[in-house]
Every structure is written in C-alpha cells, then in structure tokens.
Image: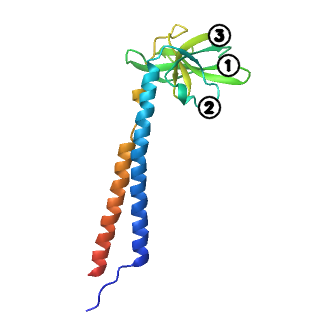
Amino acid sequence: MTARRVPIFATIVVIAAVLTMVALGVWQLGRRAEKEALLASYTAAAGENGVVPFPIAGDGADVWFRRSEVECLGAPVIEPVAGTAASGQKGWVQRASCKVSGDAVVPVDLGFSRDLAKPAWPGGKLTGVIAPGPRLVADPPIAGLQPMAKPDPGDLPNNHLAYAGQWFFFALTALVIYVLALRRRGR
C-alpha cells in the first residue's frame, strides 16, 4: 500500500490564493472603517451653514455637502438628467454647464421639472449645496423650476463589509474545492 502524495505546486498555488483573498477581505474591513469616518464627516459638513468656495479643479471631496455659490457667466448647455424633486417625485433635473471663468465650467443642477424643455436662463449668481461630482445643486432653484432633493451623504454606498464577506467566501470556497479535489484524487 503506497501513500498518496499531495501535489506540492498546486497546494502552494491554492494556499497563496486563499491568503490573498483573506488579505483582501481584511483590507475591505479597514476600508469600511475609513468610509464610515468619511460619511460621518460629510454628515457633519451638511449641517454647517458657512459658504465655501466651489472647487473648480479636482473632485472637491473635502467640501462635498457644504453650501457654496458660483457666478455663472453663461450656460450654453442646459440638459435634462433623471432626478428627484424635494417632494420625492421623479422627473428631470435641468443641469447647466456654467462658465465661471476663462475655460472653467461648473455643472449646476438648476431645479426639478416634469418637463424636458430647456428653461430660459442667461446665467447669474447661484447658491446651493456641493454634491459629488462635484456639481452645485441650486438651493433655491432658479428659472421657475421646482426644488430638488438635497444631496444626502446617506446616499453614498458603504458596501465594504459585503465586499469583505465576498472575499472570505471566495477563500473558503477555494479551500473546499481543493480538499474535495484531493479526496477525489486519493480514491
């Protein structure tokens, strides 16, 4: 009776893969904590009343959900995008590409409408809330449009726990499949 040998190369590959998947799961757990802290800072920012400059360059994530204002020198492009009214009704948000200086353009959500028609708006001073993008969500709305749902930090996903669970499940699945393969090979 001879003892069956465990394939060394395959075992090393499976162990390396399982360790990598477990490390990715642990990394996602760390990202979860970071994301929770970020969401808490966004929630605190949403409660502040001070006005901050709109971030012309970069993603402006450090000022998301804060109040801001821009001087729109003209809006050659206004287009409807799917959106929600402050009342929860679904329809269209009219989004303008506002020229603010030189070549700089800022996306601005002017207001909500059930109509696709482009509102007549020559530009001017706007106040509102900085939403991810970044874009300015006008508050109050302009050009005869209705109020939009305010940007809410709670709408940002924090699914890192689910990702961690997936990585741990993948690692467990790889181990189970490998053990079953070894048992089958041993027969």
Label 1 residue SS: strand
Quadrant of the image containing the C terminus = bottom left
Label 2 residue SS: loop
Residue denoted by label 1: 99
Residue denoted by label 3: 122
Three-letter code, disc 1: Lys
Mark earlier in primary sequence (1, 2): 2
From where the camera sits, is residue 151 visible?
A: no
What percent of the width, then of the height, locates residue 12? 42, 72
Which image quadrant is residue 61 in? top right
Q: In the rendered picture of this protein, how many numbered marks are placed on residues? A: 3
Q: Residue at x 41, y 78 (%)?
A: 8
Camera-nearest residue between 144 and 23:
23
Lateral position of residue 88 relative to residue 3, left or right: right
Mark earlier in primary sequence (3, 2): 2
Placement of 15 over or under 158, stated as above or below = below
Lateral position of residue 95 relative to residue 123, left or right: left
Lateral position of residue 125 relative to residue 2, left or right: right
**Residue 58 disc label:** 2
Which image quadrant is residue 106 in? top right
Placement of 90 over or under 16, stated as above or below = above
Mark earlier in primary sequence (1, 3): 1
Quadrant of the image containing the N terminus = bottom left
Label 3 residue SS: loop
Mark 1 neighbour density, 10 Å: few (under 14) some (14–19) many (20 or more): many
Mark 1–mark 2 Cα distance, whole angstroms, equals: 16 Å
Mark 3 neighbour density, 10 Å: few (under 14) some (14–19) many (20 or more): few
Q: Residue at x 37, y 49 (%)?
A: 164
Three-letter code, disc 3: Pro
Q: Residue at x 42, y 55 (%)?
A: 23
Placement of 8 over or under 123, stated as above or below = below
Three-letter code, disc 2: Gly
